[in-house]
Image: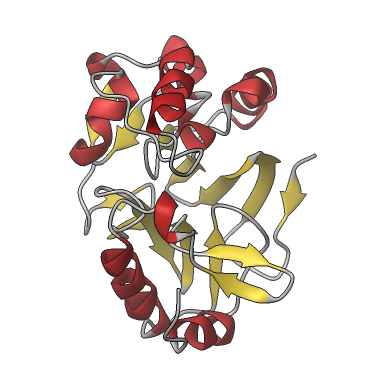
């Protein structure tokens, strides 16, 4: 079920396809952020049909966020991503930190997922504006992770995780560079935001993110 994030403007809706998929509408057009996990590809395809996005932005290459991307490529919808994520999105490499401590299983999981061709991808850089949303660099979880920002609302990918007890970082084993992930969390805590929309879990307040950034452990 597609759920409106009613406290926010511009229009933001979310559907959870294991990871959160955000449907963003602005006067500049319709942007879909992330593609969900492969087992939900049929549902993602229906979102593509019904929402008719002008582009799909992939925050990072992990398969729970890019699993349905091949469906968008089949429809000819532009796929936007940071170049540092290309090798995993196309299947040139298969580095996946899930499950923790079992890289051989992670590689098997990655190989089992449909990939996209390099021709289907378009480069997007931090600082650019895509359909009204500013692209923001959020490295650490992966080297090229990005989010988008508009009117104080940051779609933050896996730079932060939402939970009932507040904001969390992904576990160190799941981050390409955990020190950098902590630095990104601190930078988000210092931004002038109204809300943060994580890759997993519900919306977070700036206060929740500042509280998590103030913890020394993890």
**Is residue 114 visible to the viewer in this orientation of the structure?**
no
Residue 150: x percent and y percent? Answer: 43, 65
Decide: is 166 above or below 139: below
Q: Which of 15 and 10 is in front in this view?
A: 15
Could you tell me how many numbered marks the image carries? 0
Q: For the view shown, which residue lies furthest in the top direction? A: 74
In which image quadrant can residue 115 be found?
top left
Q: For the view shown, which residue lies furthest in the right direction? A: 1
Decide: is 150 above or below 148: below
Q: Which colour scheme is used?
A: secondary structure
Residue 21: x percent and y percent? Answer: 59, 42
Q: Which of 172 and 137 is in front in this view?
A: 172
Image point 35% across, 72% down: which residue? 182
Decide: is 183 above or below 170: below
Residue 161: x percent and y percent? Answer: 56, 62
In which image quadrant can residue 5 be found?
bottom right
Q: Nearer the viewer, residue 193 or 51?
A: 193
| Quarter the C terminus occupies | bottom left
Q: Which of 98 and 185 is in front in this view?
A: 98
**Side of 155 relative to 94 (left or right):** right
**Is residue 21 visible to the viewer in this orientation of the structure?**
yes
| Quarter the N terminus occupies | top right
Image point 23% across, 53% down: which residue? 128
Image point 32% across, 35% down: which residue? 80
Image point 55% across, 59% down: which residue? 198
Residue 44: x percent and y percent? Answer: 63, 26
């Amino acid at each position: 079920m597609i759920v409106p994030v009613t406290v926010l403007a511009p229009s933001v809706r979310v559907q959870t396809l294991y990871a959160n998929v955000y449907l963003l509408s602005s006067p500049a057009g319709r942007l879909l952020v992330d593609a969900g996990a492969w087992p939900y590809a049929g549902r993602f395809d229906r979102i593509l049909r019904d929402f008719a996005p002008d582009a799909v932005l992939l925050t990072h290459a992990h398969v729970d966020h890019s699993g349905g991307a091949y469906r968008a490529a089949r429809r000819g919808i532009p796929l936007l991503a940071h170049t540092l994520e290309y090798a995993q999105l196309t299947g040139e490499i298969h580095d996946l930190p899930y499950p923790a401590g079992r890289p051989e299983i992670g590689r098997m999981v990655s190989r089992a997922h449909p990939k996209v061709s390099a021709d289907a991808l378009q480069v997007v850089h931090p600082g650019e504006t895509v359909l009204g949303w500013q692209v923001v660099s959020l490295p650490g979880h992966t080297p090229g992770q990005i989010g988008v920002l508009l009117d104080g609302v940051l779609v933050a990918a896996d730079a932060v995780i939402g939970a009932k007890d507040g904001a969390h970082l992904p576990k160190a084993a799941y981050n390409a560079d955990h020190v950098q992930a902590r630095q990104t969390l601190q930078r988000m805590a210092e931004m002038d935001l109204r809300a943060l929309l994580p890759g997993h879990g519900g919306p977070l307040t700036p206060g929740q993110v500042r509280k998590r950034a103030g913890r020394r452990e993890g």
